[in-house]
Image (tube, rainbow, N blue to C red):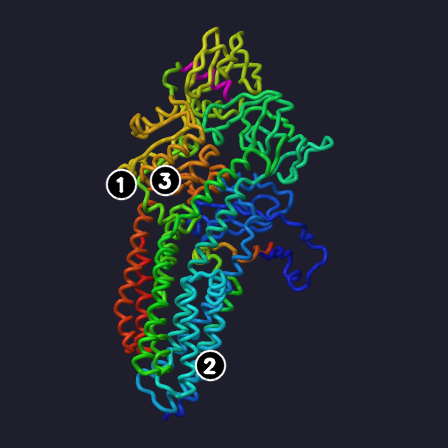
Amino acid sequence: MTMQRPMACPGCAVLPTTDVLPPAADAHVMLSLPGVHCAACIAIIEKTLHAVPGVQSARVNLTLKRASIAARPQVSVAALLQAVTAAGYEVYELNADALSATETDRQGQELLLRLGVAFFAMMNIMLLSVAVWSGASDATRDMFHWISAAIAMPTVLFAGQPFFRSAFASLRAGKLGMDVPISLALILASAISLFETIKSGEQAYFDAAVMLCFFLLGGRYLDHRTRALARSAAAELAALEVPRATVLRAGNEAVLPIAEVMVGDLIRVMPGGRIPADGIVSEGASELDRSLLTGESLPVPVTPGSLVGAGEVNLTGPLTLRVTAAGRDSSLHRMADLVAVAESAKGALRSLADRAARVYSPLVHLLSFTAFAVWMWKTGGDLRVAVNISAAVLIITCPCALGLAVPAVITSASGRLFRKGLLVKNGTALERLAEVDTVIFDKTGTLTLGRAEVSDLDAHPQEVLALALALAAGTSHPLGQALAAAVRARGITAAPVSHIREVPGSGVEGIWQGGQVRLGRADWCGAVALDVTATYLAAGGATRAFAFSDRLRPGAKTLIAALQAQRKAVMILSGDTPGAVAAMAGRLGLGPADWQAGMQPADKAAVIAGLAAQGRRVLMVGDGLNDTTALASAHVSISPASALDAARVASDIVLLGQDMAPIADALRIATKARRRMIENFLISGGYNVFAVPLALVGLATPLAAALAMSLSSITVTLNALRVK
Amino acid sequence: MMEILTILIPVSLLLGGLGLGAFIWAMRTRQFDDPQGDASRILTGEWDGRPKPEP
């Protein structure tokens, strides 16, 4: 992207001044905006971003639902995120460096160029062919054939390269891929047509050869686009967790990329920040949210000497850590390796298209060769006729529609899902999603937002709430903030509490009516801990507990109801306490047999393996590190964009927005897409059943070949667009 | 009658070539990067494509 400098005066545009702002090393930031959908959104977001000081240019790409921003190096990404969130849009940061789409971009452009050239050639040759079909003869026909040859030969050489290359590669590997018959058809058709033209023969297949090129390149381009999207999704999602750490070196604080953090460094993690590397607490006390890693929703207290792991979220007090393992060696990455093992087991799955091609490819060769042999025998060795007919058979059986059938359906279906906020990372994910009969959910962070809300506010008198508000307002602990917000929402004002002081890792205390009051952890307040997430208030010798439950993700209820309506089995597997899971299952209308609590990562994977052994096809929806092995071992998996990167990498589909309801749509669309694929195979098979006998008996004129090819390709494409 | 072909064929090739040229130009200048966004942007009154000149 090029930057344009603002014009200071009309003259500057003509005579460039030398003292304009130096184009310093601009920071390039990419944001993912799942919620952007209209012209007004573009205007609002761009205006909002431009208003952030230091931003030089911001441009929203509506098709990709992304914004790319060029800003001065000192502009913090947090400020940008905050501005967009304040404007009312969901936003996630993407790592611009990891989005090096240049290579795939170049390939895509190259394919598109070949497609354009093939289209140009096809149209011009078609124009000439129509004249030949309608009865041009003698010198006129020869001239038309020569002009066609002049257009077709370079086109086939240029546009057919992707097929020739991959056919050559598969032949060298000793395999008979789909590109071998394609290349053979292209070469044979062009060669025989050139020969016929020289001999001023009647039939030339230039139009068929170029048309074959065009339709197959179309399928190839669609396929490439899906793959490129999937690949960039994997890269950008790995980058979603933008790794930076505040490192203390020689008394200075510096924000460094995580790759530059070394073992032994001191790093500081502020409340609300995610811990970037494994380490030991050397200073400070706080509480950590480990829900992404273990699934438990209750914060864990830490003091100097405690071990902390990368990925945990610091809640109350600032911490200084001494790094024990960073980057590749951290516990997060070791988990990712486990996932890679589980993933490789999945590679054995064959897609519908692969299976079809395996049956089809030998059949094409066999038919063409048989035609050649039979006609050689029948005509008593007339090579010209035999080669002509076997070329016609190759052209007609060539998997034009087959090459288009699957890419067109996948492109159309994944485009529709993208508009609904689901990013399909894997080409075969849709097929697998269509087969699902059991859906398993993780609880914390998946069915819930991982954000607490007070569940028993009515059980407390107003003066207690006023007191709790006074104390809770002074903390950044998520439970405290949720409590304060809930009490404020009732219109209650804070009680007069003085000397409010936060004790990191424990809670908040103050003086009220001459006595000490405390809000915080159970043991610190002298209360008996409940088995659900709670915070405790100690005042005047008595203690009270405020119980919290996690806020349901929007659409969770609708989704569960929709899944039950589709007769899928639904289960919750959580690492949290039984009390919390039971309450959640009750709210979602699930029975006691439908959930299991206290699950370790290996337990989840074992449950899925057990179900798979029973022949069930499992969809796993999860977000935490404890879900990654389960995500990788399930038949197909979905994770929300807020999930840990390991989980997102392990899953096949990513939910971009907060709302869960699109998952039900995804299942419906996937079923439809699979049906369309099979229909498309049947349609292109049907055309072959009709046209191949014609070709075999030598009745396939170039006109018939052109008709069969274009009709079948157009029907499968139109059928693919019916995915709704 | 067939003499007309000496004009028509080059003309048709030229027109087709023009189309191909336009397509390659559109591809090179990244006209296909954000089709949805470009379709929406035409509706807004905002300055677009370059920063607003300072008053």
Chain of residue at mark 3:
A
Residue for point 30% across, 51% down: A672
Q: What is the number of callouts on the image? A: 3
Mark 2 or mark 1: name the one nearer the start of the chain: 2
Query: Looking at the image, can residue A88 be seen?
Result: no
- Residue A130 vs A512, above or below: the answer is below
Q: Residue at x 64, y 42 (%)?
A: A74
Lower position in the chain sequence, tag 2 or tag 3: 2
Q: Chain of mark 2?
A: A
Quadrant in the rendering for residue A118 = bottom left
The quarter of the image holding the N terminus of chain A is: bottom right
The amino acid on which the numbered mark 3 sits, given as a three-letter code, is Leu
Residue A75 on image: x %, y %: 62, 43
On screen, residue A29 versus residue A113, left or right, reads: right
Magenta: main secondary structure: helix
Residue A256: image x %, image y %? Answer: 65, 39
Q: Rounded to the nearest whole Å, what is the CA distance between mark 2 and mark 3?
A: 54 Å
Marks 2/1: CA–CA distance: 58 Å
Query: Residue B38, relative to residue A692: is it above or below?
Result: above
Percent x, y of residue A201: 37, 86
Q: Earlier in the sequence, mark 3 or mark 1?
A: 1
Is the residue A159 above or below the residue A433 in the image? below
Say if the magenta span includes residue A415: no
Amino acid at circle 2: Ala
Task: Give me the disc on residue A566.
Answer: 1
- Taking the image as shown, residue A281 lies to the left or right of residue A620, namely right
In the image, the segment drawn in magenta is A462-473
Query: Pointer 2: what residue?
Result: A150
- Residue at mark 2 shares a chain with residue at mark 1: yes
Are the residues at dot 2 and dot 3 in contact (C-beta closer than 8 Å)? no
Q: Which residue is mark 3?
A: A619
